[in-house]
């Protein structure tokens, strides 16, 4: 199973801190981040967090990322439009 989230984690150093905390919950989870280099504000400008494994507790993942001081939500099917 794979769950995909969007976050406002800005860089690899902070992502590593979050990843370490998530791994402490479940060492079997495979965790990776994709950094979106855009100047748009969150949520259109964001970092992708992917968590693979069994079982995945999405609520726990959301709580951990938020506890670490970052915004986090499940990736939704939507298109961001830039105003202006």
Image (cartoon, rainbow, N blue to C red):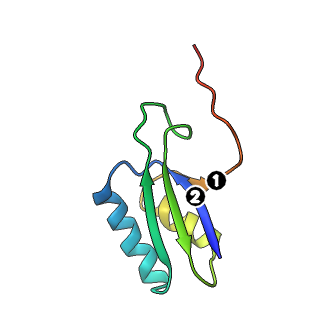
Instruction: Please report the residue visible at 33 percent of the width from the left and 66 percent of the height from the top.
Output: 16
From the viewer's side, name the closer residue of 58 and 31.
31
Looking at the rendered structure, which numbered label has been put on residue 26?
none
For residue 73, above or below residue 36: below
Dividing the image into 4 quarters, which one contains the C terminus?
A: top right
Q: Which residue is mark 1?
A: 75
Dividing the image into 4 quarters, which one contains the N terminus?
A: bottom right
Q: Secondary structure at mark 2?
A: strand
Instruction: Please report the residue visible at 55 percent of the width from the left and 66 percent of the height from the top.
Output: 63
Q: For residue 55, what is the image quadrant?
A: bottom right
Q: Position of residue 50 (x, y in %)?
A: 53, 65
For this orientation, the residue located farthest to the right is 77
Q: Within 10 Å of the Cα at label 2, are there few (<14), some (14-19), or many (20+) other Cα atoms?
A: some
Q: Is residue 15 left or right of residue 73?
A: left
For this orientation, the residue located farthest to the left is 13
Q: Secondary structure at mark 1?
A: loop
Q: Which residue is mark 2?
A: 5
How far separated are the C-alphas under marks 2 and 1? 5 Å
Q: Position of residue 77 (x, y in %)?
A: 71, 47
């Amino acid at each position: 199973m794979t769950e995909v989230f969007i976050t406002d984690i800005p860089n690899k150093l902070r992502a590593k801190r979050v990843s370490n905390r998530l791994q402490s919950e479940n060492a079997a989870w495979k965790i990776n981040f994709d950094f979106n280099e855009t100047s748009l504000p969150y949520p259109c400008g964001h970092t992708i967090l992917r968590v693979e494994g069994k079982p995945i507790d999405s609520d726990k993942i959301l709580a951990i990322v938020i506890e670490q001081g970052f915004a986090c939500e499940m990736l939704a099917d939507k298109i961001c439009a830039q105003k202006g």
